[in-house]
Amino acid sequence: MFDTLQDRLAATFKGLRGKGRLSDADIDATAREIRIALLEADVALVVVKEFVASVKERARAAELSGALNPGQQIIKIVNDELVTILGGETRLLRYAKRPPTVIMLAGLQGSGKTTLAGKLARWMKEQGHSPLLVAADLQRPNAVNQLQIVGNRAGVHVYAPEPGNGVGDPIAVARGSIGEAARKLYDVVIVDTAGRLGVDADLMQQAADIRDAVNPDEVLFVVDAMIGQDAVNTAQAFADGVGFDGVVLTKLDGDARGGAALSIARITGRPIMFASNGEQLKDFDVFHPDRMASRILGMGDMLTLIEQAEKTFDAEQSAKAAAKLTGQGGEFGLADFLSQMQMVRKMGPLSKIFGMLPGMGEMKEQINNIDEREVDRIEAIIHSMTPKERDNPKIIDGSRRARIAKGAGVEVAEVNSLVTRFFDARKMMESMASGRMPGMPGLPGTGGGKGRQPKQQPKKKGGRKVSGNPAKRNAPAQAQAPAIDPAAAFGGSQLDPNELEKAMGDFQLPPELRKMLGNQG
Amino acid sequence: MDLTTLWLLIGGILLASLVVVGFVAGSRRAALRRGTRTPELERDRTGTPAAPYATEDEHVRVDDREAPTTDRALAPQPEVELAEPLLEHPEPPQTRLVRLRQRLAGSNTALSRGLLALIARDRIDEETWEDFEDILLTSDLGVGPTTELVAALRARLRVEGVGDPGAARSVLREELVKLVDPTLDRSLNTARTDTPAVVMVVGVNGTGKTTTVGKLARVLVAEDRDVLLGAADTFRAAASEQLQTWGSRVGVPTVRGAEGADPASVAFEAVRTGIEAEVDVVLIDTAGRLHTKTGLMDELGKVKRVIERQAPVSEVLLVLDATTGQNGLTQARIFSEVVNVTGIVLTKLDGSAKGGIVVQVQRELGVPVKLVGLGEGVDDLAPFDAEMFVDALLDTGGR
């Protein structure tokens, strides 16, 4: 429903190619699109306004480079600005000169403080520290209990002298924990506090009192990535009330764009230090500003997609399927397709996965329309085929079709349509895989791109053959080609996320594919 | 995994997407042409038989009604109700409304003051409209509804004139009410039929599901209903204890399972116990889950299917946090697909967040907001009333 900024801008700039400089009118039109895109991503309005103004300024000053079309150029500016704000000063935790180092967590109710406390403790422990968790959330029923269980899972001790559920003084608990840590030689103390609202003056005062009692080296503000416009008020209230040194973004495993990260970083000037992205204690990482930037812009979060794929895909199987697609090791049959599709489905709802592919914006509607039941039906059709038919769908004739349709409980026409579409898609993928397709992304001089970033060259070629079709290749691509040999650039199997992200950012569906999908709707 | 494989893998996903999108579009068109859908067939295919659940699960136990007395020492009363002998008596709904209305008016002063200040201006120029739009946007209303509301207001004020601030105010009120749609049925279906009414509470992590179940139990107890709680959140540490604490305060028993037990089995057991004990309402608390986790969403679907073997689920309440931004719509959509949400509970409305996202949710999915949570107090849960909500917004509170 909502197009990504990339698609919006593409529409704005239709017919604008070849201009040396953007006119003021162009920039204003762009600014509106950026504004909407950022608002849809939950970036706070004040921040959006400021941000758009600074992007406008830069866009006016910028000379249009020959390599990028105006839309891409604007996106590059936006992206750079985002990364600057988000990653302004990434830093690591400060440890106290004289242990224990005290870390205090604060945030709204339900932002994930207690879970985070466990994750942080586990992470610390892995780093060779001996953390102590402190149960200073005596408000919520059984929060103390929860922290004890979390601590248990993390293999960390919990200091919980009070039963909680409203009993006990969190300030005293916090104060006592420091002595406890000093006595038992813990070198890190993590204080979990109760969730509180920014507008609740009493509880804010209590948080400040806890802070004064333990004198923390770091106060971390824990915030949910799904938070909307209120992020600014809340962050400001906490900054004023308790003061914090760093921000932790939680629930990043959802699909919220997480514009709040930008708002908070901008408004408070505090760095986002950690990102928590899962229910397991190990799902915890330092924050990557560049990924967050593409996520906020909705530029098809390829990196996340790849990470998810790596987690769920059976490497061996997909390598085999990949080989088949490139014409080695037999033909890519329906069985391979089925296993591929099943692996993709494991990653989440198909509509979401496809939506993460960049350049799919134009197909948004069809993608949103995908009903998982219809996908079940595809599976049913393939399951109703014999292994021989799956390996070689060409042998499916009229009577086989009738049988398959009966077996899957569908109309013959649907079997037909599946098989034809499969052939079409396979043909397209094969030609893409061997790089013969005109207009393949990254092949400069075709498909309307004035030499989009040639970094996409490794795609489907992976350095096996560097030259491809010389007719479709011009000078910049050649200059780039050696550098992007995966072995050299990525150190063997080592992936450089930045490079990859850049390449992905510019990835677009080839026009033929677009046409094919577009005609279906 | 080297780069080649990765790229090819992406290719594989693309291939899958090509075929699926094409197929879906194709078959849809075909179906449209035929003019017939085959609902039974489709339903059959999704109805994968519910996995076996352990009815005689020894983990599942029911705490008896005597529990409150012992638990009370652990769970002291909140300051509001001090002199109760044994169990707390939740506040009746009528007095609640008055109190909550005041609170709502107080909590949203920035919004209401801003709106009225704008309307009260003599001349409404471009800048005023922009400010107005800004105020709406900052309440998470979303770009679409905001633009629409502003356009509608502009059109009406142009026709009707803005000479009189009072008239402008009533126009604003009307348009706002239209936006929250008072025509939707917001009553909570908790009437007992042959079997107890079953209410499932679902949502993403940390929106306040357990707290909502606890508060809802109090509302129902205040209405003299017999309530049973089912702690089907077996994932989060100490979630069932949290629910039990809530229940024991008002003398409502809780059916719970061991940590890590199959939530469907706990839910099943809770409903069975509810039927045997002939209670009026069974409230099922589920674990928070992000809508993007297919496995967990499937699990939720199973919980519902398993419950439905014994009694129909009368309400599925999705708990949305007022601080949630535009992602709330996606959440609502996916939860609706999986368990057919019948109502929204908007929590944490006592903070500075306005929860404007529910407007979009209501419009897109037709699922009404039924309850609002307005604070940490145990009785701060109230039915949602569109007109009252808008009035509270416009009530500057500074009389």
Image (spheres, rainbow, N blue to C red):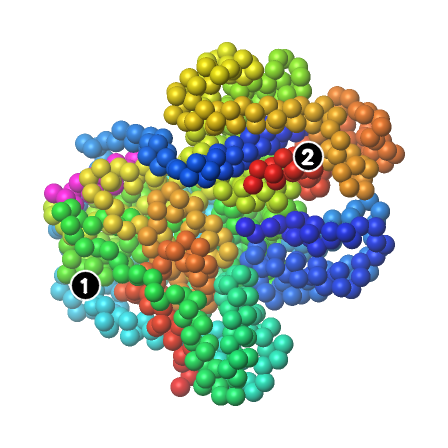
Q: Residue at x 75, y 61 (%)?
A: A27
Q: Is residue A15 left or right of residue A36?
A: right
Within the magenta stretch, is there residue B270?
yes
The image position of residue A439, as x and y in percent, is 75, 34
- Name the spot of residue B40 as percent of width and height, x first: 32, 34
* Callout 2–callout 1 Cβ contact below 8 Å: no
Please report, as a chain letter, where disc 1 is located: B
Q: Which mark is residue B222?
A: 1
Secondary element type, mark 2: helix
Report whether residue A113 is seen: no
Identify the residue at horizontal 49%, vertical 88% (top origin): B164
Height in image: A485 above or below B187?
above
Give neighbour class at mark 1: few <14, some 14-19, many 20+ (Cα, 10 Å): some
- Numbered tag placed on residue A512 in the rendering: 2
Task: From this view, report whether residue A124 is shown above or below residue A178.
Answer: above
Crowd band around label 2 with a 10 angstrom C-alpha radius: few (<14), some (14–19), many (20+):
some
Residue A172: give x, y in percent of width and height: 39, 60
Question: At label 2, which amino acid type do we have?
Answer: Glu
Question: For numbered disc 1, what is the local secondary structure?
Answer: helix
Q: Nearer the viewer, residue A167 or A481?
A: A481
Q: CA–CA distance between discs 2 and 1?
A: 64 Å
